[in-house]
Amino acid sequence: MAAAAGVSRSAVSFAFNSPHRISTATRDRILAAAHEIGYVPNTLARMLQAGQTQSLGVLLPQSLAKIMENPYYARFLMGAGQVCDQEGFTLLLTPPLRESMLKAIPYAAVDGFIVCGLEIDQGEVSELERRRVPFVLVDSDPQENVPSIGVDDRGGAREVVRHLLELGHRRLAVLSIDPGPEKAVRGYRGPLGRRLAGIVDALAQAGMTMADVALAEVPATRTDGYRATRALLADTALTAIVALSDILAFGAMDALHELGVDVPGQVSVTGFDDLTESAWLRPRLTTVRQAIATKGRTAADFLISAIRGEDQHPHQLLSTSLIVRDSSGPAPGH
């Protein structure tokens, strides 16, 4: 570019970044030459040199294919995106690299990270702190001096199981999100651990334990919810299915409809999330509502505050509420 305009490289930089430092004639010559050869300044390189990208990274716990299959993330990213639009930031989705969230961190040119679903810290927190990259944890176990956002998973799960027990259900199945291989070492962690703890709380009030319910642990996809439900019904006499995400509940409903099982006459189904489709299903899904878009907005707000050096926020716990619709009813015989 400098050679085409017959000027120094510094003059080219001034023309695009500090035009007051060169004459109008020189700037016009540089811009004319740039137009002629189709030159566009490298905005990213300039931002990186200044130490800012005006981009927030969303560090994801799963591959992009799996993330995009789950409508939960569409709601979450919508909330984060609303704040980015308002504040002039972009969003960069950062999936695991070779199945590692830690390995993906150095490759994202961002000003900070929204870290999603970090149920087990495998060095990500210390790496971000070492790099002095601002970050906010979402749906993780709270850590000291780290901003984080979560929801009352335990209370929500307790309330929905208590609802089924009050309807007379005792033959329950739980469709759980797959905890992964770390479960054998560390047990259930993060939102999943809290939701299962809420189920244990509710069962205890009825004199029951997890040994009294069927448990299936599957990836959080509609297809896996469908397959797991068919397998459960082949082996177990059930009157209610407690799905720990709406997407699994959708799959359960698909399987029950295909098998000719009346919902809720024969089997009640509940979910967790209150995705938009939950109110569209027939019957409409009883579920636990969490403020997904609000969670995304809060995470982006917290992160931008951290990037700007403003006051840091403590852990914020968002409430949940039971939304009773048509997919839950009295146990057969009650």
Image (cartoon, rainbow, N blue to C red):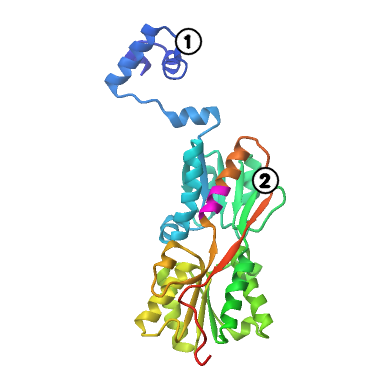
Q: Is residue 299 left or right of residue 74?
A: right
Residue positioned 43% across, 62% down in the render: 276
Q: Of helix, strand and loop, which one carries label 1?
A: helix
Q: Which residues are magenta?
A: 293-298
Residue 111: horizontal and vertical position, in percent? 55, 38
Quarter where residue 174 is shown: bottom right
In the rendered view, would you say 170 is above or below 98?
below
Q: Residue furthest left?
A: 36
Label 1: which residue?
A: 21
Residue positioned 60% across, 71% down in the render: 157
Between 299 and 10, which is closer to the camera in this rendering?
A: 299
Residue 58: horizontal and vertical position, in percent? 51, 48
The reply to whether residue 95 is in sight is no
Counting residues from the N terminus, which is met first, the one under dot 2 or under dot 1? 1
> Is the stretch drawn in magenta largely helix, strand or loop?
helix
Quarter where residue 204 is shown: bottom right
Which mark is in front, 2 or 1? 2
Disc 1 marks a residue whose amino acid type is: Arg
Residue 100: horizontal and vertical position, in percent? 53, 55
In the rendered view, would you say 53 is above or below 92?
above
Residue 259, which numbered label? Answer: none
Q: CA distance from mark 2 to mark 1?
A: 42 Å
**Magenta stretch holds residue 72:** no
Residue 313, which numbered label? Answer: 2
**Magenta stretch holds residue 296:** yes
